Image (cartoon, rainbow, N blue to C red):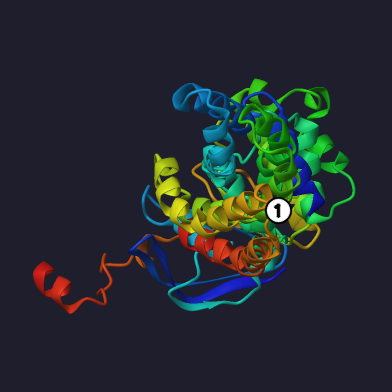
Amino acid sequence: MIALLRRDLILAIRAGGGFGLGLAFFLILVVLVPFGVGPNSEILSRIAPGILWVGALLSCLLSLDRIFQLDYEDGTLDLLATAPLPLEAAASLKALSHWLTTGLPLTLAAPFLGVLLSMPTEATIWLVTSLALGTPALSMLGTFGAALTVGLKRGGLLVSLLVLPLYMPTLIFGAEAVRRGAEGLPTSSALLFLAAITAGCAALLPFASAAALRMNLR
Amino acid sequence: MNFGVENLTCRRGEVTVLAGVNFDVAAGEALILRAPNGAGKTTLLRCLAGLTPPVAGRLKFSTEDVAYAAHADGLKAQLSVEENLQFWADIFGTKTISPAVETFELQDLLSRRAQDLSAGQKRRLSLSRLMLTGRAIWALDEPTVSLDADNVARFAAAVTQHLRQGGSAILATHIDLGLPTARTLDISPFRAILQDTPSDDPFLDEALS
C-alpha cells in the first residue's frame, strides 16, 4: 500500500508531475485580489477568509483530473484493478497523495498569504485549523469526481462541474470558522461540522470511488 | 493451474461480444486464441482478468489468480526501469525483482527512465512484470507486439518456464511462439450474433425496431 503512495508522490515531484501547481495558483490568486478590490485594508480583511477558502478550493480543482487519468491512459489503472490491492484502498491512497501534494502545502502557506490580505492575526490559527480539517474532504470528493469521469476525453472540466457543488458545505463551514475566529466569536460548531464532513467523506467515498472506477473500466 | 470457463457471455461496453464460450486449460498448458480483429479476444481476456464481470456463465477459477498483460504497457514514463518493477513487486508482495530482470535481460537498462526506452524495450519491461505477480494464470493480450525475433524467443522461454512450473496461460497472438504444450482455440464461432442486448427502456426498443 505504501508503494502506491510513494510512487504517486515521486511522480508528483518529478518533472511534469504538477506538484506546486496548485500552490502557485493559490499564491497568484491571493496576490491578484488586492489589485482587483483595491488596497483598502478594512475591506480586504473582511473578505480575506472567503478569498482564502475559495482560492484553496479552486487550486484543489486544478490537479483533480490527473488523479486517475494518467494511470488510465498508460494502462496502469487496468493493472492496478487486477492487483491484490483493493480498489477502495487505491482510491483512498490516491486521495491521500492528492492531499499531501495540494491540501497540505496550501494549509501551510495560508498564514503567509493571509498577511497579504491583511487578515486579522487572531484569525490565522483558525484559518490553518479549518484548512487542515477541510482540505482532506476536498481531496476525497475530488477523487470521487475523478473516478466518475475517468476515461472521458477532456474530463477535467466535467470534474469541476461535478465536484464544485459538493465542495459547498466545506466552503461554507470553513470560511465561517475563520470569520468567527477573526471576530472573536466561538468557532467550535463550524469546525465540528467541517470535521464531520471530512470524517463522512473518509468513511463513504473510497467505496463510491472504487465502484465508479469499476464501472468505468468495464 | 487448471482453469476454464463455462457458457461464458462477455460484454464490452454495451455490446455483447461473445456468447457461450467454453474451454478448459490444464496446468502446464497454454491456450492460444486465434480470431480475426474485433472478434473479442481482448474482451474475453479482460473478462478472465476480472475487469468486466461476465454477463452470463461461469468462470471456474478465481480472478485473483490471473496476471493480466494488456495492449498498453502500464509503465510510468518518469520512473526508471527499476522503480517501475519495484513498484509492482511491492504491490504484489514479491521480494525480489531479479528473476524478472534476468529473464528479460534488463540489467543494463535498470537506471534508465521508461520514457527513454524503445517500444520493444518497454514491451520487455511490461512483460517482465508478469514474473513479479506470482500468479498462476497468465492472460496476455498481443504480448509480442514490437518485440524482435530474439526477444520473442526470450518471451517464449519465459512462458515455457512458467508452464513447466505448473502455471497456465491464455494468449491472444498472431505469431507462432513454438510453445510445446499449446492448444489453439478459434473464438470466432462464439461471436454473439445479437449485437445489442434489449435495454430496460421499452420506448427505446420500439423506436429501434
**What percent of the width, then of the height, locates residue B44?**
48, 61
Q: In this view, does B11 lie to the left or right of B31?
A: left
Label 1 SS: helix
What residue is shown at x 57% (from left), y 42% (from top)?
A60
- Measuring 45% from the left and 48% from the top, which residue is drawn there? A159
Could you tell me which residue is drawn at 41 percent across and 57 percent down?
B40
State the residue position of label 1: A93
Indicate the quadrant where residue A85 lies.
Answer: bottom right
Amino acid found under the numbered disc labelled 1: Leu
| Residue B33 appears left or right of B203 | right
Which corner quadrant holds the C terminus of chain B? bottom left
Rendering coords of residue B11 (x, y %)? 40, 65
Height in image: B22 above or below B42? below
Which of the 4 image quadrants contains residue B72?
Answer: top right
Of B102 and A37, the residue lying toward us: A37
Image-based side of A56 in relation to B67, left or right: left
Label 1: how many residues lie within 10 Å, few (<14), some (14-19) or many (20+)? many
Which residue sits furthest right? B95
Of the pair A115 and A98, the residue shown nearer to us: A115
The residue at the point 74 percent across, 57 percent down is B163
Q: Is residue B200 among the parts visible in the rendering? A: yes
Which of A108 and A64 lies nearest the eye of the viewer? A108
Residue A160 in picture, x, y percent from top left = 44, 46
